[in-house]
Image (cartoon, rainbow, N blue to C red):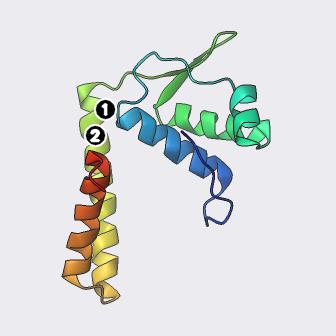
């Protein structure tokens, strides 16, 4: 499920956040489904529990998960408005990234191919 890349430029907690977000957005983890405990996930990933706790804290702040004291962490239900707001935020981020890539001389076809490959991965055709 979650596989940290120790050679990545991202910190471990960012990688864990990204993977959990991916699992939630893809529907692999459903609303109100319980996440592994901090201890369980840290053992599974062989990382410090503080790293997992930091990722969970950020995910909770971002609205992807919620915690119940004494029970654990759970996938948050995303309302239609939350989803719409998040899509707008992400579209803005993509727009800015594409503008910067254009400024740096990236070719249009490379960007189209990148987007196409992402959709292929999502559909499992790659």
Residue 59 to residue 70: above or below: below
Q: How many marks?
A: 2
Helix or strand or loop: what does disc 1 sit on? helix
Give the position of the N terminus as an image quadrant. Answer: top right
| Extreme residue in the top direction | 70
Give the position of the C terminus as an image quadrant. Answer: bottom left
Q: Position of residue 79 (x, y in %)?
A: 29, 24
Helix or strand or loop: what does disc 2 sit on? helix
Residue 29 numbered tag? none
Residue under pointer 2? 85
Residue 88 to residue 69: above or below: below
Residue under pointer 1? 82
Residue 21 to residue 89: above or below: above
Q: Position of residue 105 (x, y in %)?
A: 30, 90
Q: Which residue is at a point 54% across and 31% down the rendered structure image?
A: 60
> Are there few (<14), some (14-19), or many (20+) residues within 10 Å of tag 1?
few
Q: Position of residue 6 (x, y in %)?
A: 68, 60
Q: Quadrant of residue 43?
A: top right
Q: Quadrant of residue 45?
A: top right
Q: Which residue is at a point 27% across and 83% down the rendered structure image?
A: 102
Q: Position of residue 2 (x, y in %)?
A: 57, 42
Q: Quadrant of residue 29?
A: top left
Asked whether disc 1 touches disc 2, contact meaning CB atoms under 8 Å apart, the reply is yes
Residue 69 placement, left or right of 121: right
Question: As rendered, which of 98 and 89 lies closer to the eye?
Answer: 98
Residue 60 placement, left or right of 39: left
């Amino acid at each position: 499920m979650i596989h940290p890349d120790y050679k990545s430029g991202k910190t471990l907690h960012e990688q864990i956040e990204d993977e959990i977000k991916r699992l939630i957005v893809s529907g692999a983890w459903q609303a109100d489904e319980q996440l592994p405990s901090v201890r369980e996930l840290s053992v599974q990933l062989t990382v410090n529990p503080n790293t997992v706790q930091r990722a969970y804290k950020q995910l909770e702040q971002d609205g992807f998960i919620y915690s119940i004291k004494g029970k654990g962490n759970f996938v948050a239900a995303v309302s239609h408005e939350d989803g719409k707001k998040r899509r707008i935020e992400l579209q803005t981020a993509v727009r800015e990234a594409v503008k910067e890539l254009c400024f740096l001389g990236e070719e249009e076809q490379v960007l189209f191919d990148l987007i196409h490959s992402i959709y292929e991965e999502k559909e499992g055709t790659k």
